[in-house]
Image (cartoon, rainbow, N blue to C red):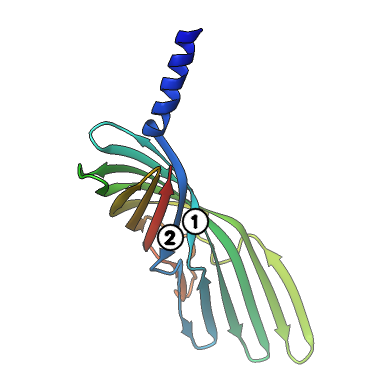
Amino acid sequence: MRALLLLFLAAASAWPQIISFGVKAGLPFTDFLDTASSGRVNFSTVTNRYLVGPTAELHLPAGLGLEVDALYRHFSYQGTTSGVDTLTSQSTTAGSWEFPILLKYRFPTPLVKPFVDGGVAFNTLTGLNQTITNTVFPSRTTTTSTTNPAQLNETNTMGLVLGAGLDIHALFLHVSPEVRYTRWTNQQFRDVNGLLHSDLNQAEFMVGFTF
């Protein structure tokens, strides 16, 4: 019984060295969507300037690690199309979940360890909803909604990720500021007029807090 207790205590003390958990928050440098206006068709967008979610890392020998994140952001876009006696407006909101899987290497320096990482990321849309209001002047207005807007191209996509940062060890806490770049393979949104589309290049500054 005593031997089993000692084995359990040894495993519990080693666990934080094998795997760590925490949270990541980020500030995107790029918009989720690119929009433009042309004549009677206009698009605009709002990307909330945050990324946030849980993170976990499996620590491997020789300074290597395998990191998995689940990062959420919210965005919206609006569009209007005007005719001789009609006005059609669209208001679209959605969330985006991003799941990077990264191989990380930490350089062997004390306390503050520079690192580089790279891998793949998967992105899926959630809560997608578009409200369409059609006005025929002078007095008729109809409103409909859909979860499959005309601008939707792909619900899911994947990309390649590269990053670099610092792992700062302070007592039991690791603080990890990082600059990360993702190149997506497909546009999740694409308007037939070319006035709205997903940005294939994504960059952000992130900070991780892990235990």
Residue lying at the far right in this picture: please name it: 139
In the displayed structure, does residue 89 sit left or right of residue 108?
Answer: right
**Residue 22 percent coordinates (x, y):** 46, 45
**Residue 156 percent coordinates (x, y):** 49, 51
Q: Which residue is mark 1?
A: 52
In the displayed structure, does residue 177 sit left or right of residue 144?
Answer: left
**Circle 1: element type:** strand
**Residue 211 vertical position relative to residue 150 in the rendered view, above or below:** above
**Residue 118 percent coordinates (x, y):** 30, 47
* Three-letter residue code for mark 2: Gly
Nearer to us in this view, 173 or 197? 173
**Residue 160 vertical position relative to residue 136 in the rendered view, above or below:** above
Do callouts 1 and 2 mark residues in contact (Cβ within 8 Å)? yes
Q: Choose the circle earlier in sequence order: 1 or 2.
A: 2
Q: Quadrant of residue 66?
A: top left
Q: Which residue is mark 2?
A: 26
* Three-letter residue code for mark 1: Val
Q: Residue at x 43, y 50 (%)?
A: 209
**Circle 2: element type:** strand
Q: Residue at x 50, y 60 (%)?
A: 153
Q: Quadrant of residue 82?
A: bottom right
Q: Residue at x 30, y 32 (%)?
A: 60
